[in-house]
Image (cartoon, helix red, strand yellow):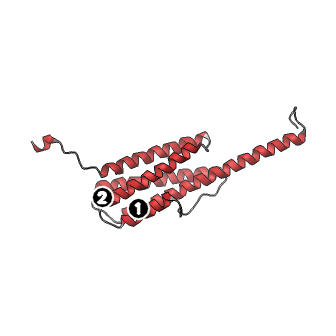
Amino acid sequence: MSHPYQSPDKYFTSRLKINLMNNSANAQTIKILNDLIQLHNNRLEAYQKVNVSGKENLQIKNILLEGGLLSYEMREQLIKEVVMLDGNPALGKSLNGKSSHTWSTVIKIVSNYNYRKISAAFETGEYVTLLVYRNIMKANLFPAHLIRIVSKQKEAIFQQYEKIKNLRKPAIIKQEEFA
């Protein structure tokens, strides 16, 4: 059955163009989601390395454990979205780009026992991750439900960034404690 205002050939040609555009948009969405999955794989590796090393500082250890869990949950959510779009989720880590380089540097620093360097490295890693999320949001390439997911993830990463950043601030000493 054809559209009443078009010949059958024109109708099917226009439907085919719409389907091709949707397939192209899906492919682009899958690629971006896979880039985020790889970014989370990089983050997870960094968080796991620091947790295995058994640091004595419980505050930083708890925050980093939380960050690893957060990244794992985000990655799993993105994998589900890629599968729903009939795509193949990325399995490995990102090997190029600023975010990959940053997280590789974090992994190298984790072997150092200097908590200031570790927290500074993670702060930088999360900052770069926030930039990636910001750029994806600015590009406005996702459908509404994915924009909500990515926006929530960005907010959670920002919260993690703030926690790590606060680790590097010296504790504020209340005057009453010394009175």
Secondary structure at badge 1 equals: helix
- For label 2, the crowd category at 10 Å Cα-Cα, with few meaning under 14, some 14 to 19 and many 20 or more, is few
The residue indicated by pointer 1 is 106
The residue indicated by pointer 2 is 116
Asked if residue 3 is positioned above or below residue 123 in the image, the reply reads above
Instruction: Quadrant for the N terminus, please.
Output: top right
Q: Nearer the viewer, residue 101 or 157?
A: 101
Nearest to N terminus: mark 1 or mark 2: 1
Residue appearing at x 43%, y 52% in the figure: 126
Residue 97 screen position, x and y as percent: 52, 59
Residue appearing at x 39%, y 56% in the figure: 122
Q: Nearer the viewer, residue 154 or 98?
A: 98
Q: Which mark is residue 16?
A: none
Secondary structure at badge 2 equals: helix
Instruction: Quadrant for the C terminus, please.
Output: top left
Q: Amino acid at mark 1?
A: Val
Q: Amino acid at mark 2?
A: Arg
Residue appearing at x 55%, y 47% in the figure: 136
Residue 119 screen position, x and y as percent: 34, 56
Residue appearing at x 80%, y 42% in the figure: 15
Residue 91 screen position, x and y as percent: 57, 62
Horizontally, is 176 left or right of 112 in the view? left
Residue 104 screen position, x and y as percent: 45, 64
Q: Farthest residue to the front: give it.
A: 98
Q: Nearer the viewer, residue 172 or 96?
A: 96
Q: Farthest residue to the left: give it.
A: 179
Compute the Cα span from label 1 to label 2. 12 Å
